[in-house]
């Protein structure tokens, strides 16, 4: 964040104190400030990948002023190394980052001082996929077939799915196809794949007029999890000024996401302004947005605030990772990896 003059900092602290007092009295508040009175806080947000439908709420909030009205200058950045996002946030070289639940749990086991502070996509996108013309009717039909995976972790996912559906692991041949999931499937190198996203590969196959069966992994036997979460450096969560900025970030993201859901054309324009390939493959990105936007809005189902992460979900998923050897330490409370305390509408006194 930029350095600010003492006078501006005092004014900001006064405004934050007023916000805290209001929140303590009513339990909820609008996370807004007067941008004419407080210099914008700059937030560098590392994306998990190139801009895509999962990021629609962020880019919409940048373009429509949802962040501006909360005195935030949000800068989404494509990481030079997607595998280093957690390290960058933990080192303070980025304010926030987008990553995956499994990465968060693994990194924390290995000493990373980060926490997930809110969900962007709170359900699995990862899916098991096969072409209709393969003749496979159900997961039980994978017996004797070849399945393409993209790494050891996905082999665990596949093995869990097979066990849940009564298919012996040894009856299915697994081939690591790295990220060439769709080419391997279309070329018949494999009969099915695991790791493809229903809002990416599922959409691409449909547009290519290759009818496919696409089953999200949590509908096939794997515990559900938050697919995409926002992380912050753990030490920063003790700093009131920073955490109030995070609260305003989620309030702006909530508004931007709702605006994107209400106006998919505007969401497409917001994304395409920031990544030229989106214009070059507009039909795909518009179709991906169509199926993705509804689930972005679902991060505030029921009485829970926007961005809510269910502690029991993290506990169950962490246990599954441990049972499958992806985590090794014992006696770990996997819910320590998350906090919902900084979501909009959550009173600061809850901390």
Image (cartoon, grey):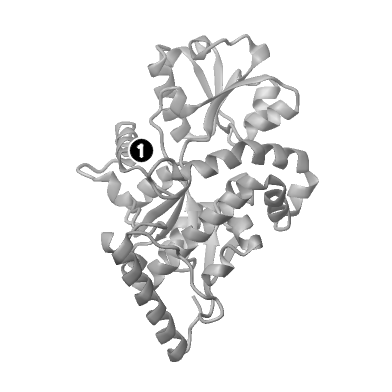
Residue 164's place in the image compared with 66, above or below, is above
Work out whether residue 25 or residue 331 is closer to the camera in this orientation and state it.
Answer: 25
Q: Residue furthest front?
A: 26
Q: Does residue 184 appear in the picture of this structure?
A: yes
- Dot 1: what SS? loop
In-image side of 331 versus 28 (left or right): left
The quarter holding residue 168 reads top left
Q: Does residue 351 appear in the picture of this structure?
A: no
The residue tagged 1 is 326
Q: Residue furthest right?
A: 280
Give the quadrant of the C terminus. bottom left
Residue 191's place in the image compared with 196, above or below, is above
Residue 190's place in the image compared with 344, above or below, is above
Work out whether residue 270 or residue 195 is closer to the camera in this orientation and state it.
Answer: 270
> Where in the figure is residue 25, as x and y percent of width and height?
29, 65
> Where in the figure is residue 305, as x and y percent of width and height?
41, 50
> Where in the figure is residue 26, as x and y percent of width and height?
32, 62
The quarter holding residue 63 reads bottom right
Crowd rating for badge 1 (residues with CA inside 10 Å; few <14, some 14–19, many 20+): some
> Where in the figure is residue 260, as x and y percent of width and height?
63, 49
In-image side of 302 versus 196 (left or right): left
Residue 232's place in the image compared with 120, above or below, is below
Work out whether residue 192 or residue 97 is closer to the camera in this orientation and state it.
Answer: 97
In-image side of 201 versus 298 (left or right): right
Residue under the image location 44 percent in, 35 percent down: 153
Residue under the image location 44 percent in, 60 percent down: 87
Residue under the image location 56 percent in, 80 percent down: 36
């Amino acid at each position: 964040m930029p350095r600010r003059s003492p006078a501006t900092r005092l004014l900001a602290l006064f405004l934050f104190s007023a916000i805290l007092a209001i929140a303590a009295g009513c339990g909820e508040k609008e996370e807004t400030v007067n941008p004419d009175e407080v210099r914008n806080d700059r937030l560098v947000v590392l994306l998990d990948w190139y801009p895509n439908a999962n990021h629609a709420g962020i880019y919409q909030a940048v373009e429509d002023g949802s962040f501006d009205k909360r005195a935030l200058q949000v800068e989404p950045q494509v990481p030079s190394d997607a595998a280093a996002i957690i390290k960058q946030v933990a080192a303070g070289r980025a304010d926030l980052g987008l990553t995956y639940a499994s990465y968060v749990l693994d990194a924390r086991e290995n000493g990373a001082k980060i926490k997930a502070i809110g969900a962007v996509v709170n359900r699995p996108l990862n899916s098991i996929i096969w072409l209709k013309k393969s003749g496979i009717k159900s997961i039980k039909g994978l017996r004797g077939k070849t399945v393409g995976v993209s790494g050891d972790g996905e082999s665990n996912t596949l093995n869990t799915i097979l066990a849940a559906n009564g298919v012996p692991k040894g009856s299915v041949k697994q081939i690591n196809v790295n990220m060439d999931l769709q080419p391997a499937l279309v070329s018949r190198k494999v009969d099915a794949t695991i790791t493809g996203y229903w809002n990416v590969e599922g959409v691409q196959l449909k547009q290519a007029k290759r009818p496919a069966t696409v089953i999200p992994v949590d509908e096939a036997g794997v515990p559900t999890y938050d697919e995409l979460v926002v992380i912050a450096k753990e030490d920063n969560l003790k700093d009131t000024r920073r955490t109030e900025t995070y609260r305003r970030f989620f309030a702006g993201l909530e508004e931007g996401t709702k605006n994107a859901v209400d106006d998919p054309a505007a969401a497409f324009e917001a994304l395409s302004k920031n990544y030229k390939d989106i214009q070059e493959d507009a039909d795909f990105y518009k179709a991906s947005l169509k199926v993705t936007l509804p689930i972005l809005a679902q991060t505030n189902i029921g009485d829970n605030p926007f961005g809510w992460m269910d502690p029991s979900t993290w506990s169950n998923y962490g246990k599954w990772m441990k049972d499958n050897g992806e985590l090794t330490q014992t006696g770990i409370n996997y819910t320590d990896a998350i906090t919902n305390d900084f979501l909009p509408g959550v009173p600061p006194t809850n901390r």
